[in-house]
Amino acid sequence: MKIFRRLTAALGLFSAMVAGGAFVFVVALTFVVSIFRDVEISAWNVVASQVGPWFLLFIGVYAIHNMMPVAVAHGRTRREFLLAASAFSVVLAVVMTATEWLGFLVEGGIYSLMDWRADEHGAQLSYFLMYLVWIAVGMLCAAAFDRYGGGGLFVLPVALALVVVTRLRMPGSGNLPFVDDTPDLFGSALPAVLVLSFVVALAGTWVIARDMPIRQRTS
Amino acid sequence: MRVEVQGLTVRYGDVTAIDDMSFTLSGNKIYGLLGRNGAGKTSLMSALAGYRKPSGTVQLDGVPVFENAAAMRRVCLVRHSADAADKGDKVSHVLEYGAAWRDTWDNDYALELTELFKIGLRTKVGELSLGQRSALGVVIGLASRSPLTMLDESHLGMDTPTRYAFYDTLLHDFMAHPRTIMISTHLIEELSSLLEEVVIVDAGRLVLQEEADVLRSRGTEVTGNASDVDEFTAGMTVLGEKSLGRTKAAMVYGALEDDQLIRARGLGLELGPIALQDLFVHLTDPVGGKR
């Protein structure tokens, strides 16, 4: 619980602040764009569906690469840390989904006021599951590279497969590099597949990081 | 805290850092872990702290340490300060981690030490000098008040006054809160007066584990007229010699027999203790290939 509280206090607060800053930035940017052309898309959706997942991937990487060694150095076990980080990933995905929802609400009001048009955005559940998977995949990649060095490259195809699924029905998410027009084969089972992706990424992280050596770092 | 190591082996690929090492530390002493570069000191400490899964057994007070929450709580290893602090963190955050995650953490003492070592609480770890980072490591190690506290090369980059402050602080804290403290260092003479027991490793193997005073008695410094010293030390293992005019000092390895002591007195030679550092050099790089 102590690790969970620390993760939430440090990374949860940081993530919420970054999301708030990003919202203010894109609203300001939208006003600037509106001077030159008509506004036709939701700027917040670009952040929520494209920038957000990459940011959460970074948070997942940071948790394993930076915070796990610190926790072990302060007398905590990897198991304790991974349990806390797993719970934290769910809580952070909830917080970021709530931020995303609030952002759309405020942005909708501004767009109505300014008579701007916005394209469609995804359902809350889709955002939540997308964030969840990207955090877990960040943790998986960090664990693989920290443990195996260059050998961590072998986890990248798995990581890519796990995150591609999150983009299938996410309007405005754009395409990942090298992955274009991915066919949606899952139908109504997609949410279950996304939960499975999260579980696979988390299980992979546990398998790799459970007895990972804490290497000496130079700072 | 009692430390038991049995058949410990640590490998990095093809390199064997620790090779089937076994020893026991009875605890509540200041131990010196001595070894040359690459001897396996950091690997050994890492295994003792549960930083890596041991091949062999590492037990603290009879229980395995690796991924054992109860045992891990009672150990603190500081390899400089890098593991216990992220370079992007402010020093105050590092202390908060200690306060949040260590039940035995003494935050007042941590603040006192940061003041002693002149470490700014608002400074980021990455912006500290090497000596300040080492001092922060000492703060983390001592304020953890862990029953097994290990400081690996904690003097790195410290200037002389700071090192002396570190040694004084270490001794005072040990007297006030006796526990098992293990220190690895290359500055053997500076620390030798603090060490109660010495563990010497070389090429991943245990060379020697002995009380520091007993170890010192393994060698003698013989001082006197150069020709008398030469005559007396003929046939002995001489670790080193120093001359000033007609006076010469020779460091010989091995305890002197009674008849040798009488002969030295007869020649008017002075006999004194040998520096721990000279013994260490001999034990890890033996004169004539014999330890």
Image: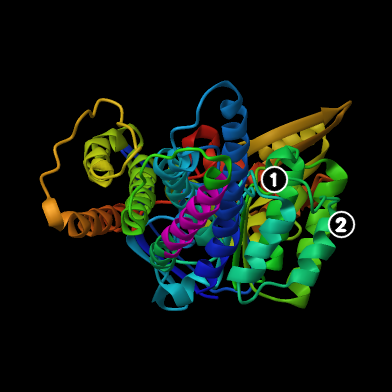
Q: Is residue B194 above or below residue A133?
A: below
Residue B229 appearing in the image:
yes
Read off the residue under disc 1: B125
> In x, y percent, where is residue B73?
53, 72
Q: Which residues lie in the magenta part?
A: A91-110
The subunit carrying tag 2 is: B
Question: Is A70 situated left or right of B164 in this image?
Answer: left
Q: Residue at x 47, y 60 (%)?
A: A98
Between circles 1 and 2, the one closer to the viewer is: 1
**Residue B258: quarter of image:** bottom right
Q: Main secondary structure of the magenta part?
A: helix
Read off the residue under disc 2: B116
Task: Identify which residue, A72 or A40, lies in the foreground.
Answer: A40
Question: Is B70 situated left or right of B221 in this image?
Answer: left
Which quarter shows the N terminus of chain B? bottom right
> In x, y percent, where is residue B266?
80, 49
Question: Is B42 situated left or right of B263 in this image?
Answer: left
The subunit carrying tag 1 is: B
Q: Is residue B27 above or below residue A146?
A: below
Lower sequence index among marks 1 and 2: 2
Task: Identify which residue, B53 or B30, lies in the foreground.
Answer: B53
Task: Identify which residue, A84 or B218, lies in the foreground.
Answer: A84
Check disc 2 and report its element: helix, strand or loop: helix
Name the disc covering residue B250, or none. Answer: none
> In x, y percent, where is residue A64?
44, 51
Q: Residue at x 65, y 43 (%)?
A: B186
Q: Is residue B184 above or below residue A90?
A: above
Q: Spatial distance from mark 1 to mark 2, Cα to Cα?
A: 17 Å
Amino acid under label 1? Val
> In x, y percent, where is residue A82?
39, 62
